[in-house]
Image: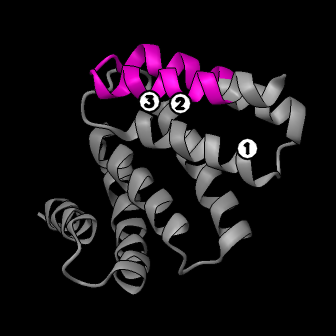
Amino acid sequence: DTAELTTAIEAVADMLAATGKLEEAARLLRELLALRESSLGPSNFETGRAAATLAGLLAREGYHGDLEEAAKMCRLVVKEMWRQDGEKSLAHGRAQLHLATVLHRKGQVPDVAEAVPVCRLALSALEAALGRMDLEVLRCSELLIDLLR
């Protein structure tokens, strides 16, 4: 059954990510995304959630994989979360934060220049959804400060 398989893959990927095995977790999350796309379609909520999970992992500090792939995945998730939930939604704000983080990690001038407005939009959405004193909002604020230096 596909639902059981995807649940198991997601659980193992979460465990791998929690133990710092990010490349292995990314491989499983890519499989999960492919399964959800083939069984549920590319515009399904669960497919979008799988893509967002993969994008979040690819944006993490300890991930040393292809940052171009990470940026591409994050851009797709930003568009999908906007389509599903709207511009000021928490999911869209998190997707934008992941994209800004990846662009910052790439470190090239055009990437950092793109990251600033993306990070501002993320901060606005996260503040609206979580309030100013939330840890995720504070991390986004720190990233924006870093980008503006």
The answer to whether residue 4 is left or right of residue 131 is right
Examine the image and state in which quarter residue 24 appears.
top left
Q: Position of residue 98 (x, y in %)?
A: 41, 51
Identify residue for label 2: 69
Q: Residue at x 61, y 23 (%)?
A: 8
Q: Is tag 3's residue or tag 1's residue first in the polypeptide sequence?
A: 3
The answer to whether residue 111 is left or right of residue 87 is left
Identify residue for label 1: 47
Q: Residue at x 27, y 21 (%)?
A: 20
Q: Residues within 10 Å of mark 3 (few under 14, many from 20)?
A: many
Q: Is tag 2's residue or tag 3's residue first in the polypeptide sequence?
A: 3
Identify the secondary structure beneath mark 1.
Answer: helix
Name the residue nearer the viewer: 29 or 114. 29
Quadrant showing the N terminus = top right
Colouring used for the render: one colour
Specify the segment rendered in magenta: 7-31
Residues marked 3 and 1 touching at CB (< 8 Å): no
- Prevailing secondary structure of the magenta residues: helix
Question: Whole-Å distance between the Cαs marked 2 and 3?
Answer: 20 Å
Q: Position of residue 37 (x, y in %)?
A: 81, 35
Q: Is residue 21 magenta?
A: yes
Q: Residues within 10 Å of mark 2 (few under 14, many from 20)?
A: few
Is 35 drawn above or below residue 57 in the view shown? above
Q: Residue furthest left?
A: 149
Examine the image and state in which quarter residue 141 appears.
bottom left
Type of amino acid under label 1:
Thr
The answer to whether residue 71 is left or right of residue 123 is right
Is 56 drawn above or below residue 20 in the view shown? below
Quadrant showing the C terminus = bottom left
Identify residue for label 3: 14
Q: Residues within 10 Å of mark 1 (few under 14, many from 20)?
A: many
Q: Residue at x 25, y 35 (%)?
A: 61
